[in-house]
Image (tube, helix red, strand yellow):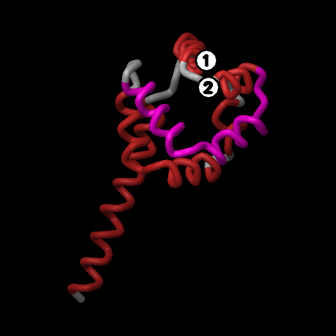
Amino acid sequence: MKKVLIIIMIIAILSIGAVSFASGFNRDNIDKDNYSRMIDLAKENGFSEVAIAIEDRDFDSMDDFMNNMSEEDYEKMIDIMSNNGHKGMANRMKLIGREKMIEMHNSMGGAQACHNNR
């Protein structure tokens, strides 16, 4: 009985953690001015191809970039975000790592789901 109770408690804690983690992403919704600033930052920091893909709503190119980004690019993105007012998102990206971020991006519908409302 104790084992069952412990398992239920672990599942509850993990579920609460997952919901809390996901709601953090919702709090970081970016308004149009910040969205434009994000594109400018990408261009200024060597990510001009993906910035242009975002501007052109080229979801296939965005997904291609996301699925093939190097660890170095991922760390560079974290640094850019951290140094430009998005420390919360940068910390979450650092916490889950590149592979899990790519997996999460794809499981949420990829670039089209993330950028289609712009």
Residue range (magenta): 56-82
Q: Which mark is residue 99?
A: none
Question: As shown in the figure, which amino acid type bears the numbered disc 1?
Answer: Lys
Residue farthest toward the top in the current orientation of the protein: 33
- Quarter-of-image position of residue 93: top left
Name the residue beneath numbered marker 1. Answer: 43
Q: CA distance from mark 2 to mark 1?
A: 5 Å
Q: Quadrant of the N terminus?
A: bottom left
Q: Secondary structure at mark 1?
A: helix
Question: Residue 80, how many percent across, how many down?
Answer: 45, 25
User: Is 103 within the magenta?
Assistant: no
Question: As shown in the figure, which amino acid type bears the numbered disc 2?
Answer: Phe
- Quarter-of-image position of residue 112: top right
Asked if residue 11 is positioned above or below residue 37 in the image, the reply reads below
What residue sits 54% from the left and 13% below the top? 37
Q: Which mark is residue 47?
A: 2
**Is residue 71 found left or right of 115 in the rendered image?**
left
**Is residue 2 found left or right of 59 in the rendered image?**
left
Along the line of sight, the residue nearer the viewer: 25 or 70 = 70
